[in-house]
Amino acid sequence: MAHIEKTKNESDNAPSSNLTFWQRYQIPVMLTTVGGAIDTIGFIGLLGFFTNHVTGNLVMAGGGLVKGGDGLWVKLGALPVFLLTVIITKRMINITSANKPILSNLLFAEVVFLLAFLASAIYFGPFEQAGTLEVAFTGFLGLTAFAIRNTAGKTIMGKMKPTLLMTGNTTQLGIDLSDYVFDRKNCNMSSLKHSFTLVASFTIGAFVGAVLFIYIGLWAIAPFVLPVLYAAIKMRDKQALKMAY
């Protein structure tokens, strides 16, 4: 926790008023776009498996109990895989010294698992049955990649807000819009811009991912690994890092 507290204290004095929109939001925009794209590609290519979160998989599993269908065990398996990844990631955050680039390292770990996800998807795909070991193995690699980032988002990426789960961001957007329309005195324009940017980026990513999947199938994962790699490199820069905490 020393790493988190130290970085937050350093960032309190960080000048931000002179930053352009792109300087302020480029990393959240990239990461959120990737989240929307790969979740969409994974859902289509893995026949109903969500790589971004557990909620969708549990709902799909519940639906499978009622309506039947393959892949119930794969979706239920998402929960322990996600939890194990979170436990390990949180432990790594806690034991990493304050002078280490932990966020960058976590993003690099995400890149590694996304590349493994891509390789597995290309090697085993296209998939035709939802309940196979190949679907489970491939889906769990993607889930692990995003479980790492979800953990970072809940612990050390405070200013960025969640870049994968849009329910909270959409709720915040609604709150910000309500303040803007009905209560200008309490309107936080910075929060409105941020929440709108994240929701819009995720939406755009989802549509772009879907279009790419139509033309190149599971290879559509490949271009979305690059923004995460860029973010991992960028987060080794102290000035850029201040925007994340």
Image (tube, rainbow, N blue to C red):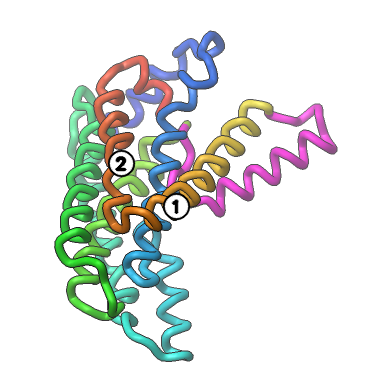
> Which mark identifies residue 6?
none
- The residue type indicated by label 1 comes to Val
Report whether 16 appears left or right of 77. Answer: right
Decide whether residue 168 is among the magenta residues. Answer: yes
- The residue type indicated by label 2 comes to Pro
Q: Which residue is mark 2?
A: 223
Please state the horizontal and vertical placement of residue 150, each as a whole percent of the image: 37, 48
In this view of the protein, can residue 245 be seen by the observer? no
Vertical position of residue 113 compared to residue 176: above or below? below
Question: Which residues fall within the magenta stretch?
Answer: 160-188
On-image quarter of the C terminus = top left
Residue at 29%, 62% in the rendered image = 83
Type of secondary structure dominating the magenta stretch: helix
Question: Dot 2 lies on which element?
Answer: helix
Residue at 47%, 31% in the rendered image = 159
Please state the horizontal and vertical placement of residue 188, each as a whole percent of the image: 68, 29
Vertical position of residue 214 compared to residue 224: above or below? below
Q: Residue furthest front?
A: 215
Q: Which residue is mark 1?
A: 211
Decide whether residue 111 is among the magenta residues. Answer: no
Tags 1 and 2 touching, CB below 8 Å: no
Relative depth, front residue between 90 and 157: 157
Residue at 34%, 48% in the rendered image = 151
Question: Dot 1 lies on which element?
Answer: helix
Q: Quadrant of residue 231?
A: top left
